[in-house]
Amino acid sequence: MTPLPKRKISKGRRDRRRAHDALKPRNLVQCSNCGDMRLPHHVCPHCGFYKGREVISVERE
């Protein structure tokens, strides 16, 4: 036989364990060049700028 738990884990103990499992919203900052929201310390996916200079060229539609 496989091992089984000795006691039922109460709802409170189960929910306290899951207290840190919630998803957190992404921390977005505003791009200094185009004003769109982007991740901090990342190249802006909309304009290709990082720290005031163009790092990648993005095709504009």
Image: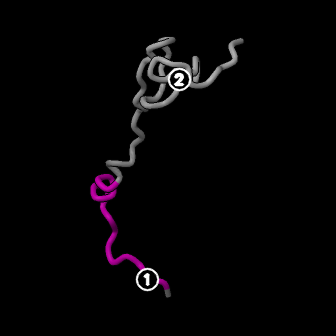
| Rendered view: 27 above or below 37 | below
Q: Residue at x 56, y 25 (%)?
A: 55
Where does residue 58 sit, x and y in percent of width and height? 65, 20
Mark 1, other Cα within 10 Å: few <14 / some 14–19 / many ≥20: few
Instruction: Count the marks.
Output: 2
User: On the image, which quarter does residue 4 sit in?
Assistant: bottom left
- Where, quadrant-wise, is the C terminus in this rendering? top right
Assess whether residue 41 is covered by the magenta stretch. Answer: no
> Callout 2, which amino acid?
Cys
Numbered label attached to residue 44: 2
Numbered label attached to residue 58: none
Q: Which span is picked out in magenta? A: 2-17
Q: Closer to us: mark 1 or mark 2?
A: 2
| Mark toward the start of the polypeptide (1 vs 2) | 1
| Rendered view: 48 above or below 41 | above
Mark 1 lies on a secondary structure that is: loop
Where does residue 23 sit, x and y in percent of width and height? 42, 40
Mark 2 lies on a secondary structure that is: loop
Q: Residue at x 41, y 22 (%)?
A: 29
Which residue of the protein is positioned furthest toward the bottom in this rendering? 1
Q: Residue at x 43, y 31 (%)?
A: 41
Q: Which residue is mark 1?
A: 3
Using the image as rendered, state which of residue 26 and residue 8 is in the foreground: 26
